[in-house]
Amino acid sequence: MNRAAGEDWRGARIGVLGGTFDPPHRGHVRMAAAAREVLGLDRVFFSPAPHPPHKRDEPLSAWTHRRAMTLAAIQGEDGLALTGIELDSAPSYTVDLLRAASARTGADLYFIMGADSLADLAAWHQPREILGLCTLVVFPRDGRPVRVPVDGPAALVVFESPRVDVSSSAVRAALAEGTAPGDALPAAVSAYIEHNRLYRRC
């Protein structure tokens, strides 16, 4: 089945933001919107990973919930879209996501990430191939220095803002304790979580 049927991959510059999105928060949306505006991206696709390899032993919300929350997070945001091209890929490696995106568009690809993820890039599957498939767009996180930890040529764009100081794990922990996570979540995501009783201890 073609999971990307009906998705509009046309354009000269396409952004990709992959992640678990459990749940998606305002930091994700702000990064995507800033990258699109500053870099002139035609579109930024959010891709919730169905089978994130680094979280095989961790509890994870169903992909259907994470997809629905991501769609809620970007609803009404100009130029932000959702893709399902990873759904048939297990495990969900970033290099495979970028290959699938490259097969659907002749556009230059921009992979959006936080500095914390960049610091772990050397441990990712086929990191050098990732560098060859896209320009990395990196946002500050927790004061981490921005350095590509993989030998080889890399196209890199570093943003100084918005600084992403919220994490999905912190949001989950707050919700599990019955504490509202402030303004970390888009209102539609908060409503979805409440309606479906996600992240509660019981």
Image (cartoon, rainbow, N blue to C red):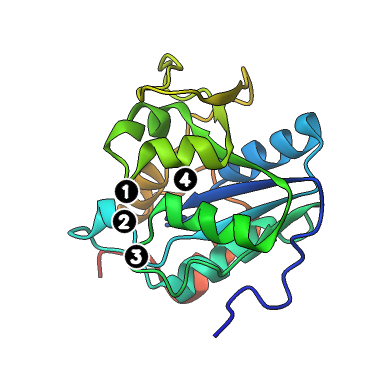
Name the amino acid, label 3.
Answer: His
Of the image marks 4 and 1, the number of the one nearer the N terminus: 1
Name the amino acid, label 1.
Answer: Ala
Indicate which disc residue 51 carries.
Answer: 3
Q: Which residue is mark 4?
A: 181
Of the image marks 2 and 3, the number of the one nearer the N terminus: 3
Query: Quadrant of the image for the C terminus?
Result: bottom left
Q: Is there a contact, CB below 8 Å, between mark 2 and mark 4?
A: no
Q: Is 40 placed left or right of 66 in the picture?
A: right
**Rendered view: 88 above or below 30:** below
Query: How far, Cα to Cα, is label 2 from label 4?
Result: 10 Å
Name the amino acid, label 4.
Answer: Pro
Query: How far, Cα to Cα, is label 4 from label 1?
Result: 9 Å
Q: Which residue is mark 1?
A: 173
Q: Quick one: label 2, few (<14), some, or many (20+) residues within 10 Å? A: some
Q: Is there a contact, CB below 8 Å, between mark 2 and mark 1?
A: yes
**Rendered view: 84 above or below 171:** below
Please name which of the two marks, 2 or 3, marks the residue nearer to the observer. Answer: 3
The residue positioned 51% from the left and 51% from the top of the image is 18
Q: Quick one: label 1, few (<14), some, or many (20+) residues within 10 Å? A: some
Secondary structure category for the residue under label 3? loop
Q: Quadrant of residue 32?
A: top right
Q: Is 137 placed left or right of 14 in the picture?
A: left
The residue positioned 22% from the left and 58% from the top of the image is 58
Q: Which residue is mark 2?
A: 176
Q: Quadrant of residue 55?
A: bottom left
158 or 32: which is nearer to us?
Answer: 158
Name the amino acid, label 2.
Answer: Ala
